[in-house]
Amino acid sequence: MTKRFPKIRDVAEAAGVSTATVSRALSAPEMVSRDTRAIVLKAVEATGYRMNHAARNLRRRQAGGIVVLVPNLANPFFAQILSGIATAMAPSGYNVLIADTRQADAGSSMLDYLHNNRADGLIVLDAGLPEEVLSAGQGRAFQPPIVFACEWLEGDDRASVTIDNAYGARLAIDHLVALGHRRIGHVMGPPDNILTLTRAQGTRAALAAHGLAVREGWFFAGDFSLGSGAAAAQRWLAMDDRPTAVFCASDAMAGGFVGALHRAGVRVPGDVSVVGFDDIEIAAHLVPALTTIAQPRRLIGETAAQKLLDLIRKTGQPGGVRDVLPVELVVRESTGVPARRSPR
Amino acid sequence: MTKRFPKIRDVAEAAGVSTATVSRALSAPEMVSRDTRAIVLKAVEATGYRMNHAARNLRRRQAGGIVVLVPNLANPFFAQILSGIATAMAPSGYNVLIADTRQADAGSSMLDYLHNNRADGLIVLDAGLPEEVLSAGQGRAFQPPIVFACEWLEGDDRASVTIDNAYGARLAIDHLVALGHRRIGHVMGPPDNILTLTRAQGTRAALAAHGLAVREGWFFAGDFSLGSGAAAAQRWLAMDDRPTAVFCASDAMAGGFVGALHRAGVRVPGDVSVVGFDDIEIAAHLVPALTTIAQPRRLIGETAAQKLLDLIRKTGQPGGVRDVLPVELVVRESTGVPARRSPR
DNA sequence: ATGAAAGCGCTAACAC
DNA sequence: GTGTTAGCGCTTTCAT
């Protein structure tokens, strides 16, 4: 900013009113008479006035933005959620800052965002953040409202927007069982992650409900990434006693898993059936197209944003409300064929 | 912000110095004696002081952030670039705002970002923005510095960070020709896009250089998306006289193309060879793994961010510098087999 | 090297 | 419904 912009005073002079009236006409139109408003608007037009947000924020003692904490910006799973957040936030005028929690500098600047003046609220997509970050400001003067989305903290009563992960797992297992599979494995997300836990637990429960064995050796470690899916495939290949179907806790892992199997000459769904989780855009285009559990990602983002706005404005419930959005099974080629291998 | 934070005055009192000294100790340490600095830092610690950015920005007459204009946040291609930008920007303290230019509200708020006080600089990944947006502030008091990345404006002399798209196309075509293909098609990006133009032109030139026919019917319309790749596959399938190899201007289109062909019973690379462009993460995991032209995406982001910082600080060259970063061919399965169909 | 003081541009009491 | 005025918390001359 080197040259000067018209400021509110310029508009006031052009309109022949006080700066307060201009401010009101712009920020609280109902407080100003119809005529004055029109005059002010015209003056705004004429002067080319644009508000200085730094000044407004300073005066209002707010930051003017919210921050979204994402575990991995490069994961396409988050793109739609982010997009939903941006859409829902747009009319509010708040800036949306996106921060990758796994980034190099994470620690330092993250706290800076939370502790105070840099954010009026937070949407946290990574519940695995260090305790001191998530409870930032707890002991201090002020903690900005937080909404957890996708992930959440067990036993924490803050607002969240999630899905029923165990139910998603059950849909996947039920589908595989209906196809005739009785030897079913699971590729898990990163250890200690709440999604990993609930999906794995849901898988165990569903397996048990069908009277099927829960074999620990068929629960493969992973971390939601493509590479970890491929690595799980290597372990699958090395087994004597393989499951005939594998439910992966993310589409990315399913993609990596299928790709690696393919490279080893194993066919999907011919030799193994695979189910993913998320229904990322490419799932439908993969070879074979991936059967998966679809989450309403855009809606998750929009809902989280709306809740945060309510919290900031102290509208709505006292807080701590947990929304659980619906998931559904999308059947595609990767499980298209009923199990054919002898079930042992 | 409802309760109060310690402000600079509190620190000053705790340290027994003036607010000016605290400010200097924090923002220009070299202007303050070693001892005073230590005392101030201790007081900062003790009071739990955190700077109010709105106040600083107001006083300094700056916005405190830069905005990145992305054509489509949901496209994983941009994720790494964004990540690179965030990394390079982190130490500067500038906020990084990411805005999706294809979003509903785009028009309105975009101008607001550009015209003034909301951004100290811009990184534009979408050169297809309306003219009035890209030249925002041209006639006005002030226009924030802009760096174009990936895409650029023909004949515009502002800074940019790009790759040599025509060369990328040549690498792809050379590879296919070396494999024995003589009937080569191309799936293009969105019309009027500079990347579409340069890649298509590069394809034509490379084809001509090998003495091969440039058949307009083999240039398929697309828009970089998965779906458009799949649609191109339908057109390919409907042809009598098909190319034996197809170079797609993006990995997403290549993925959609291959997926749709697979669903129609056509094998890649058995029946057609396919080359993509970008080398997005999943390219290596697709079935078949995708041969593609790799771009240094993270580096593009970092370079663009650095250039913007230079522009903002008026360091570095007068501006208008165009960086061209290297691309390379990555050979994988989707072209792994020399052409076997009779070349007609 | 440090301090005093004047705002940056806006909004929100408070008057009228 | 509109005007006056006092800051929001910081940086930055200008003195010293």
Image: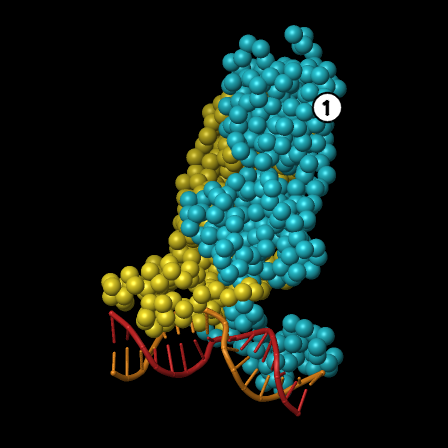
Chain colours: A cyan, B yellow, C red, D orange
- On the rendered structure, is A59 left or right of B31? right
Q: Say which quadrant the N terminus of chain A sits in.
A: bottom left
Residue occupied by mark 1: A174
Where is the C terminus of chain A found, in terms of image quarters?
A: top right
- The residue at the point 45 percent across, 73 percent down is A3
* Residue B111 place in picture, x, y as percent: 58, 63
Please give left or right for residue B21 compared with residue A236 in the image: left
Q: Chain of mark 1?
A: A
**Residue shown at the point (38%, 67%) measured from the top left:** B11
Label 1 crowd (10 A; few <14 / some 14-19 / many >=20): some
Question: Can the viewer see residue A250?
Answer: no
**Dot 1: what SS?**
helix
Comparing A295 with B218, the one in front is A295
Residue at left offset 60%, top offset 40%: A154
Instruction: Depth check: give the residue in front, B135 or A24.
Output: A24
Image quarter of residue A277:
top right
Q: Position of residue B189 (x, y in %)?
A: 59, 42
